[in-house]
């Protein structure tokens, strides 16, 4: 494919430690984009080049690198594998031409890939599987394939069969060219004769490949039925058109570390990956000559400020031209952490655009403004884990909210909550590491030290017994005195009603103009009841009182009302209310019963479960669960499900909590208030 057709883009995705960063390095080395192959151990790879990623030895954000392979332009994008950083792949997959799912020959890791395959299938993103680390396979390729097929809706078809020597894999036979290669660690594989012992296996595997392709092509199907051997060039065509439509998933083999099968991977990417115009059309764009670019991520860099990472779906962007209504004043190509200023980004390029302040992730940019065409990017992932954030130094408080805002722009799977009850700022995200990385970024990029701790549960309290209370505020201090006298009835209300104030004053026992002050005094008290929490679900009625012609005032009645509440409320049989959430947990069906145990173990109430729509072999369990029990729910859920299980939740209701648990919460609250 000549460059006039545009540069193509491939993303490397898959689970944590499957070898994506290493494979990207091997691909870049093979394409001569780096002169020396870096390793993650030495910390000199193109991927993982941010200080936070290097320090952790893991990818925490996508890393893009431009290169050329056999005359074609490419952008390779290394995505973090950890489920906590899945937003990065979610951003980028809808804008690439092909995804390479990098996985290990280890069936115990398959389940963790289920959400990724589901995403690729749902969004019809052409993808191939690369079974990596074959210098140390943990399972037979046939078993790996069968296991992966269980989490993929599309048929997976072996493009190569391994040549075995005992447990070791020493090479492969390509099923289309019918050529055999022997791996030479660190070098190009050597062409060899197909071993005699493999002739049968090769024929069977080839037939399976052809039959899978024939399911999508009637001519090929006819040929197979008539025992006609199709031309190799025809088979290549079928394969690339099936990949472009995401109707089959070719499977390749190799090892990024020893460079085995890497050249072959490049060749099949080059041959089979659809062109940018094909991808653009399938994403709802009409490729033409006018520039259309889609922003898939915002990045804040130390020197350049805001960068909008975009794919050029149509036309080209030149420095100084117009985009989104403003002049382009910074165009950069990407190579890991290195941003190089360029004068033009052609069709298909992945480019960083400087200082487009009004542009966000998902925006489609045209010369004049923002376009309407194209599929929108998927919604950001829902947060599942939160920690309260505080600055270590007081003077950083103002800086913090701006910095956190930028983190959310860069990664919309973070979310900020300002809790009005607990007065905490809670940073929500995808898990412990995700939040810890936010802290590291705040430190590295904005020089703000923050402390993190589990957020407080927004408990409330209410009452169970009605009473009447009389209170008088009287002060004689020289000139004007103060006098207010109120009788109030305090009564519980049904759950969820909130607070109501009323009066039954007759004959001006409390003059009309002072009644709002009585209400204000009552309301003021309600922010902290006898147990120390905001009070809800009660009604207070002012039914009598007295006043003094000279000494009564708004302030005096307000104080009297507050005294009535302070003295009356402890006699109303106060009770703690805890927030309870409605939770939906997605889990592989064979773990459903263990999830039920998990729910009841956390004082939850199971409401029922159903097959998860569109997910074969998965259930969604619905339950009520106290918010206090949910803080680390995701951690336990992931450990039950190889990281694949997840949940959504929302506040549902407040429920009374009594007994030892409630006593402990109240005691802790009293201690905190006294401190
Ligand atoms: N045996 C073997 N190990 C590999 C291979 N590729 C990567 N690794 C090792 O697997 C670990 C994770 O590699 P990395 O590229 O960081 O994985 P990522 O998390 O998918 O980016 C590192 O210790 C690598 O040295 C491979 O092809 N064979
Ligand atoms: Mg990595």
Image (cartoon, rainbow, N blue to C red):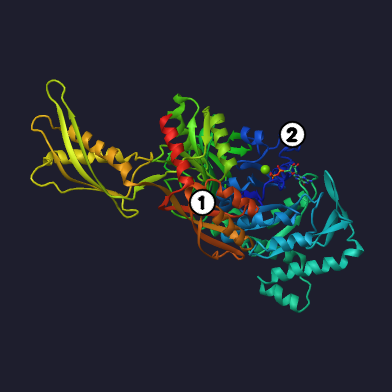
Kindly indicate whether the residue at mark 2 contacts the one at mark 1 (C-beta within 8 angstroms): no
Residue at x 63%, y 50% (from the top left corner): 8
Q: Residue at x 74, y 67 (%)?
A: 209
The answer to whether 486 appears left or right of 188 in the picture is left
The answer for how far apart the CA atoms under marks 1 and 2 are is 45 Å
**Looking at the image, which is closer to me, 437 or 165?**
437
Residue 395 visible in the shown view = yes
Outermost residue toward the right?
A: 196
Is residue 290 positioned above or below 472 on the image? below
Q: Is 54 in front, or is 316?
A: 54
- Relative to the observer, which residue lies in front, 137 or 617? 617
Instruction: Report helix, strand or loop for mark 1.
Output: loop
Is label 2's Cβ within 8 Å of ligand 1? no
**Most distant residue in the top direction:** 478
In the shown orientation, is residue 631 left or right of residue 144? left
The residue that label 2 is drawn on is: 42
Q: Position of residue 553 (x, y in %)?
A: 15, 32
Residue 633 position (above or below residue 480): below
**Residue at image mark 1:** 289
| Location of residue 611 by image quarter | bottom right
Query: Residue at horizontal 87%, vertical 57%?
Result: 164
Residue 372, given in percent of the width and then of the height, sits at: 43, 53
**Mark 2 residue element:** loop
Number of other residues with Cα within 10 Å of mark 1, as a class: few under 14, some 14 to 19, many 20 or more: few
10 Å neighbourhood of mark 2: few (<14), some, or many (≥20)?
Answer: few
Residue 256 percent across, percent down from the top left: 76, 46
Percent coordinates x, y for residue 542 in the rendering: 19, 45
Relative vertical location of residue 115 with respect to residue 226 in this rendering, above or below: above
Say left or right for 336 vs 410. Answer: right
Question: In this orientation, does residue 424 appear?
Answer: no
């Amino acid at each position: 494919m000549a460059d006039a057709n545009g540069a193509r883009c491939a993303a490397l995705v898959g689970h944590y430690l499957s070898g994506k960063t290493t494979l990207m390095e091997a691909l870049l080395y093979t394409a001569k984009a780096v002169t020396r192959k870096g390793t993650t151990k030495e910390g000199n790879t193109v991927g993982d080049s941010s200080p936070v990623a290097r320090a952790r030895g893991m990818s925490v954000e996508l890393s893009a690198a431009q290169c050329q392979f056999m005359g074609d332009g490419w952008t390779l994008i290394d995505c973090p594998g950890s489920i906590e950083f899945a937003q990065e792949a979610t951003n980028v997959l809808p804008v690439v031409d092909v995804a390479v799912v990098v996985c290990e020959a280890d069936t115990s890791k398959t389940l963790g890939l289920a959400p990724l395959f589901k995403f690729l299938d749902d969004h019809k993103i052409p993808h191939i599987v690369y079974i990596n680390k074959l210098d140390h396979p943990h399972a037979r390729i046939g078993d790996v394939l069968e296991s992966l097929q269980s989490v993929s809706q599309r048929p997976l078809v072996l493009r190569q069969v391994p040549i075995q020597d005992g447990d070791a894999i020493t090479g492969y036979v390509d099923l289309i060219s019918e050529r055999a290669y022997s791996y030479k660690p660190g070098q190009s594989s050597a062409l060899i004769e197909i071993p005699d012992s493999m002739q049968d296996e090769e024929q069977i595997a080839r037939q399976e490949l052809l039959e899978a392709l024939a399911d999508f092509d009637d001519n090929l199907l006819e040929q197979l039925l008539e025992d006609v051997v199709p031309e190799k060039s025809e088979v290549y065509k079928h394969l690339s058109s099936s990949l472009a439509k995401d109707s089959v998933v070719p499977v390749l083999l190799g090892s990024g570390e020893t460079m085995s099968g890497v050249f072959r991977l490049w060749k099949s990417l080059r041959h089979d990956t659809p062109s940018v115009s094909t991808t653009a059309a399938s994403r709802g764009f009409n490729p033409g000559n006018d520039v259309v670019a889609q922003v898939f991520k915002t990045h804040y860099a130390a020197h350049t400020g805001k960068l909008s990472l975009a794919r050029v779906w149509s036309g080209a962007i030149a420095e100084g031209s117009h985009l989104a209504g403003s002049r382009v004043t910074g165009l950069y190509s990407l190579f890991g952490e290195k941003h190089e200023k360029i004068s033009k980004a052609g069709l298909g390029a992945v480019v960083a655009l400087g200082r487009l302040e009004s542009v966000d992730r998902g925006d489609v940019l045209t010369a004049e403004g923002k376009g309407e065409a194209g599929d929108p990017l998927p919604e950001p992932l829902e947060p599942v884990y939160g920690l309260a954030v505080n600055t270590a130094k007081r003077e950083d408080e103002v800086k913090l909210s701006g910095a956190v805002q930028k983190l959310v722009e860069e990664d919309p799977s973070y979310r900020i909550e300002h809790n009005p009850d607990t007065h905490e700022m809670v940073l929500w995200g995808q898990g412990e590491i995700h939040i810890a990385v936010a802290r590291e970024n705040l430190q590295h990029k904005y020089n703000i030290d923050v402390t993190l701790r589990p957020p407080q549960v927004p408990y409330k309290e209410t009452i169970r017994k009605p009473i009447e209370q009389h209170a008088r505020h009287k002060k004689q201090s020289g000139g004007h005195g103060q006098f207010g006298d109120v009788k109030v009835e305090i009564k519980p209300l049904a759950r969820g009603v909130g607070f109501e104030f009323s009066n039954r004053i007759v004959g001006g026992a409390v003059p009309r103009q002072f009644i709002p002050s009585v209400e204000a005094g009552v309301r003021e008290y309600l922010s902290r009841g006898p147990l120390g929490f905001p009070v809800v679900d009660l009604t207070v009625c002012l039914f009598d009182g007295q006043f003094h012609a000279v000494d009564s005032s708004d302030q005096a009645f307000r104080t009297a009302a507050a005294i009535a509440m302070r003295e009356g409320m402890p006699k109303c049989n106060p009770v703690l209310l805890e927030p309870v959430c409605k939770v939906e947990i997605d889990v592989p069906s064979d773990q459903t019963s263990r999830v039920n145990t998990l729910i009841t173990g956390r004082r939850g109430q199971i409401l029922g479960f159903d097959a998860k729509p569109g997910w074969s072999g998965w259930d969604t369990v619905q339950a009520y669960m106290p918010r206090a029990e949910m803080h680390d729910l995701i951690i336990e859920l992931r450990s039950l499900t190889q990281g694949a299980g997840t949940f959504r939740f929302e506040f549902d209701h407040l429920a009374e909590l009594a007994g030892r648990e409630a006593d402990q919460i109240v005691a802790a609250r009293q201690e905190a208030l006294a401190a």
